[in-house]
């Protein structure tokens, strides 16, 4: 079956991935088979299972075959598949070099997984108001579903531009092929509406058995990032301030502790995609993807080491002396008594490696409190065309943990440069860099200033990128099947 038709069916059907009760640890839930809508959504337990199924779909976007980290970090100057210790996979290499074609398998998978997530949340949202679910759980499930849908669309609109905006289940498969692309503005308006509502419905925190669910702080943080991306700086600062002043979150005292085992739900984790090793398909494949090629049995025990996302020399050299965050980049590994010079990210490779491919408990941070602090500082500076005390307090908290001195006395321009640099150095391998470059209008300038060539360390780009390449192409099968409703992005 073609991928594009699978996408439409995913919009039309609810496919639940887990069973078990949502009031227990939802990472412990077990897979079940497909259930048609008419035979489901009858009890509160059904809706609870459906929400957990949406979290499963979200996990597939960020790990599994969704390859979010490749589409974001590999596109940037922070990682490459063209450095020592990488596998040379063509589909990934082409993304790294801005040479991807419209049938790239990772674009297809990301599109499909994203709309599968949207389909699951839509199936919940259209039914829950009239359901027998208790009011408190009805609010929570609605808020979680809205926030997950918003996150899916936030990623899609930044990757592809305007996309089909589907907010209800589509039961007529033929008609669904005629759903055209909404404008970028329309997609953002829906994202904003979903997150504004979500933050009023979800709780500020959960008990230990439900850590990892979307909280008020997560919805507020995402909305702040949505505003920041659209240059609505005052609105962004207001959302980030809610998180900062809530008292709910704090930086871990030691940066390296972020990437130790057992850090699910730590005080800095505003939104994590959580995985569970040795649990029948609930693990992540992050260690396998990030471990250098040839290092299986050394950096990770088994499951394959593919080197899909290797740190560049450029990001390694960007840290100043004394910055403890540089230690998250390993410069190589020992093999038969000799050092193999192949950089890798310790935070993914050296923890919770699991017992095979896709069997790791290594989680993915979508938003950390440090990200919010830096985004807050940026938004304040942009809104007022100058940093204030709150902006300095936010950025200096992050710098202090990194072992750096406080900033002071900067102008609007010099503070902007400082916060951009801090955003890169704080979380270079967590899916922010490419979106940061796009948001701040620096993508072409930065990437074209670092073209790879003889004697130059690669960042994955050997020829200047063009403006149309700031968006990915819509997958070929989507365009072909839905033509003329869905047209291709210019240039592809």
Image: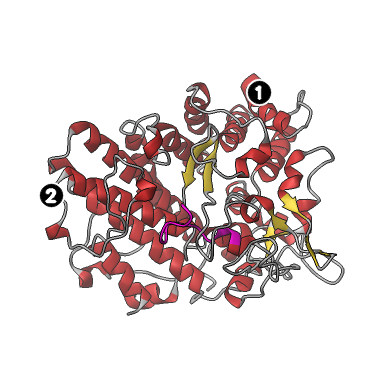
Q: What residue appears at the point 48 percent right and 37 percent down from the top-left corner? A: 265
Residue 353 shows up from this direction: yes
Name the outermost residue toward the right.
455
Q: Where is residue 69 drawn, in percent x and y?
A: 56, 58
> What is the crowding at mark 1: few (fewer than 14 residues within 10 Å), some, or many (at least 20)?
some
Tag 1 residue: 393
Q: Nearer the viewer, residue 399 or 401?
A: 401
> What is the crowding at mark 2: few (fewer than 14 residues within 10 Å), some, or many (at least 20)?
some
Q: Is residue 414 magenta?
A: no
How many discs appear? 2
Q: Nearer the viewer, residue 41 or 287?
A: 287
Q: Where is residue 462 drawn, in percent x and y?
A: 74, 70
Q: What residue appears at the point 50 percent right and 54 percent down from the top-left corner? A: 158
Q: Where is residue 240 drawn, in percent x and y?
A: 51, 30
Tag 2 residue: 42
Is the magenta region chiefly helix, strand or loop?
loop
Residue 386 shows up from this direction: no
Vertical placement of residue 430 versus 65, above or below: above
Q: Is residue 404 left or right of residue 429?
A: right
Q: Nearer the viewer, residue 81 or 241?
A: 81
Q: What residue appears at the point 22 percent right and 37 percent down from the top-left corner? A: 138
Q: What residue appears at the point 48 percent right and 68 percent down from the top-left corner? A: 107
Which of disc 1 and disc 2 is earlier in sequence?
A: 2
Q: Nearer the viewer, residue 436 or 216?
A: 216
Determine whether the residue tagged by mark 2 lies in a helix, strand or loop: loop
Marks 2,1: beta carbons within 8 A: no
Determine whether the residue tagged by mark 1 lies in a helix, strand or loop: helix
Vertical placement of residue 219 versus 410, above or below: below
Q: Where is residue 399 drawn, in percent x and y?
A: 72, 32
Part of the protein shown in magenta: 276-287
């Amino acid at each position: 079956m073609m991928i594009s038709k699978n996408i439409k069916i995913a919009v039309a059907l609810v496919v639940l991935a887990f069973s078990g009760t949502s009031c227990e640890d939802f990472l412990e839930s077990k897979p079940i088979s497909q259930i048609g809508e008419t035979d489901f959504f009858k009890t509160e337990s059904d809706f609870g299972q459906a929400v957990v199924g949406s979290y499963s779909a979200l996990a597939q976007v960020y790990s599994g075959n969704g390859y979010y980290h490749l589409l974001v970090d590999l596109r940037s100057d922070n990682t490459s598949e063209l450095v020592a210790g990488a596998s040379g996979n063509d589909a990934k290499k082409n993304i790294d070099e801005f040479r991807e074609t419209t049938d790239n398998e990772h674009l297809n998978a990301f599109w499909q997984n994203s709309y599968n997530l949207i389909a699951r949340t839509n199936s919940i949202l259209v039914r829950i108001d009239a359901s027998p679910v208790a009011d408190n759980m009805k609010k929570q499930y609605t808020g979680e579903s809205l926030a997950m849908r918003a996150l899916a669309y936030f990623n899609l609109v930044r990757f592809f531009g305007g996309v089909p905006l589907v907010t209800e289940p589509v039961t007529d498969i033929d008609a669904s092929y005629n759903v055209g692309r909404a404008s970028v503005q329309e997609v953002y308006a829906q994202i904003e509406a979903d997150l504004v509502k979500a933050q009023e419905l979800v709780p500020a925190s959960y008990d230990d058995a439900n850590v990892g669910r979307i909280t008020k702080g997560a919805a507020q943080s995402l909305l702040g990032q949505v505003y920041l991306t659209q240059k609505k700086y005052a609105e962004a600062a207001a959302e980030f301030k809610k998180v900062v002043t809530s008292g709910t979150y704090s930086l871990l005292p030691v940066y390296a502790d972020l990437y130790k085992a057992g850090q699910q739900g730590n005080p800095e984790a505003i939104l994590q995609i959580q995985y569970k090793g040795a649990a029948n398909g609930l693990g992540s494949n992050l260690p396998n993807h990030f471990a250098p090629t040839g290092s299986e049995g050394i950096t990770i025990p088994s499951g394959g080491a593919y080197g899909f996302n290797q740190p560049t020399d450029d990001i390694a050299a960007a840290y100043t002396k004394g910055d403890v965050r540089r230690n998250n980049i390993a410069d190589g590994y020992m093999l038969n008594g000799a050092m193999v010079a192949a950089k890798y990210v310790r935070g993914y490779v050296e923890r919770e490696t699991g017992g095979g491919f896709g069997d790791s408990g290594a989680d993915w941070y979508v938003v950390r409190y440090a990200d919010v602090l830096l985004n807050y500082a940026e938004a304040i500076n942009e809104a007022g065309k100058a940093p204030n005390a709150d902006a300095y307090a936010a950025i200096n908290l992050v710098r202090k943990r990194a072992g750096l001195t406080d900033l002071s006395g900067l102008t609007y321009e010099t503070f902007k440069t400082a916060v951009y640099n801090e955003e890169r150095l704080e979380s270079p391998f967590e899916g922010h860099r490419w979106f940061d470059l796009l948001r701040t209008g620096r993508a072409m300038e930065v990437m074209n200033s670092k073209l790879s060539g003889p004697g130059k360390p690669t960042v994955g780009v050997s020829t200047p990128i063009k403006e149309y390449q700031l968006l990915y192409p819509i997958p070929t099968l989507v365009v072909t099947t839905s033509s003329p409703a869905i047209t291709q992005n210019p240039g592809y």
